[in-house]
Image (tube, rainbow, N blue to C red):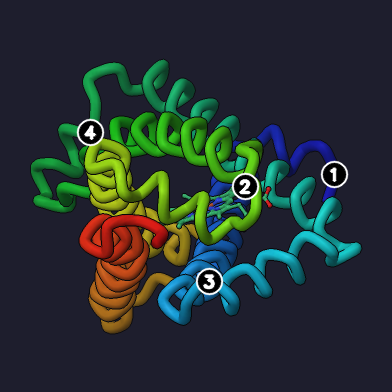
Amino acid sequence: MGSGFFSSSIGRKIVVALAGLLLCLFLVVHLAGNLLIFAGAPTFNHYAAALEHNPLLPAAEIGLLALFLLHILFSLKLRWENHRSRPVGYAESASKGGRTPGSRTMLVSALLLLAFLAVHIKTFRFGHPGDSLYRMVMTWFSNPYYSAFYVLSMAALALHLSHGVQSGFQTLGLNHPRYTPIIRALGVAFAVALCTAFAAIPLWALLAGGAR
Ligand code: HEM
C-alpha cells in the first residue's frame, strides 16, 4: 500500500471505514467488560485489575488512540474536500430520499462524542479510583447530571452508529440491491442494542443510589 492510497479519496474512505468498524469492535469488548458491573464489586474490580496488569494494555491503548485519530482526521479531511467540490451540500442524495437522521447529523453526533470522550477519559481513565474502580464508577453515576450526560451521549452514539456501521460496510464493498437494506437494518439494530446496554449502566447505578 503506497502513499498514493492515503492521498486518494477512496483510500481515505477505506481507512475511515476500517477504523470505524474496528472501533465498534472495541465498543463491544468495552461493553462486555463494563456489564460485569452488574455482577457486583468483587467481579468488576477483579476484571479491572486483570486489565490493568495485562502487559499488552499499553500497546492496545496506543492502537486505540491511533484508530480514533485516523477515523476523526480522515473523516474531517474527506468532509472538507467534499465541501470544497460540492459546497451546495447533498441536494442530490436528499432528492433521492437517501438521507437518514443518522447521516444528516454525523458531524453533530461526532462533536458530541468527542466532548463525551474527553469527559469520560478524564474521569475514568485518569481519575483516581481510590480503593476500587467499582466505587468510583458508581459514585460518579449517582450524580443525576453526570448520568444524564451519559444517557444523552449514548443517544448521540446510537445516531452516529446507525449511519456509520452500514456506511462503513458499503465503503468496504458490501453493496448489493438485495443485501444493502439488510445491512442497514442490522446496523441500526446493533447501534440501538449497544447504546441501550451502555446507557443501562448509569441508569441502574443512579437508581441503586451509587456504591453502598
Ligand atoms: C456506561 C458506559 C461506560 C462505562 C461505565 C465505561 C467505563 C469505563 C472505565 C471504567 C474506563 C477506565 C478503565 C478501563 O480502561 O476499562 C473506561 C475507559 C475508556 N472508555 Fe469507557 N465506559 C463507558 C462507555 C464508553 C463509550 C461509549 C466509549 C466510546 C465511545 C468509551 C471509550 C473509552 C475509552 C477510549 C477508554 C480508555 C481506554 C484505555 O485507555 O484503556 N467508553 N471506560
Residue 129, label in figure: 2
Q: Amino acid under label 2?
A: Pro
Q: Which comes before the other along the chain, label 4 or label 2?
A: 4
Residue nearest the viewer, comparing 155 with 164: 155
Q: Residues under labels 3 and 1: Cα distance?
A: 49 Å
Mark 4 or 2, closer to the camera: 2
- Which of the 4 image quarters holds residue 87? top left
Circles 3 and 4: CB atoms closer than 8 Å: no
> In this figure, which residue is indicated by the disc labeled 1?
2
Spot occupied by residue 49 in the image (x, y as percentages of width and height): 74, 66
Q: Residues under labels 4 and 2: Cα distance?
A: 47 Å
- Horizontal relation, residue 53 to residue 24: left or right: right
Secondary structure type for disc 3: helix
Secondary structure type for disc 4: loop
Q: Residues under labels 3 and 2: Cα distance?
A: 13 Å
Circles 1 and 2: CB atoms closer than 8 Å: no
> In this figure, which residue is indicated by the disc labeled 4?
90
Q: Amino acid under label 4?
A: Tyr
Q: Residues under labels 1 and 2: Cα distance?
A: 45 Å
Q: Amino acid under label 1?
A: Gly
- Which residue corresponds to the image point at 45% horizontal and 33% vertical from the top-left? 114
Q: Work out whether 192 lies above or below 79.
A: below
- Horizontal relation, residue 118 to residue 144: left or right: right
Q: Work out whether 39 lies above or below 28.
A: below
Spot occupied by residue 170 in the image (x, y as percentages of width and height): 43, 63
Q: Which comes before the other along the chain, label 1 or label 2?
A: 1
Secondary structure type for disc 1: loop
Spot occupied by residue 75 in the image (x, y as percentages of width and height): 51, 35
Mark 1 or 2, closer to the camera: 2
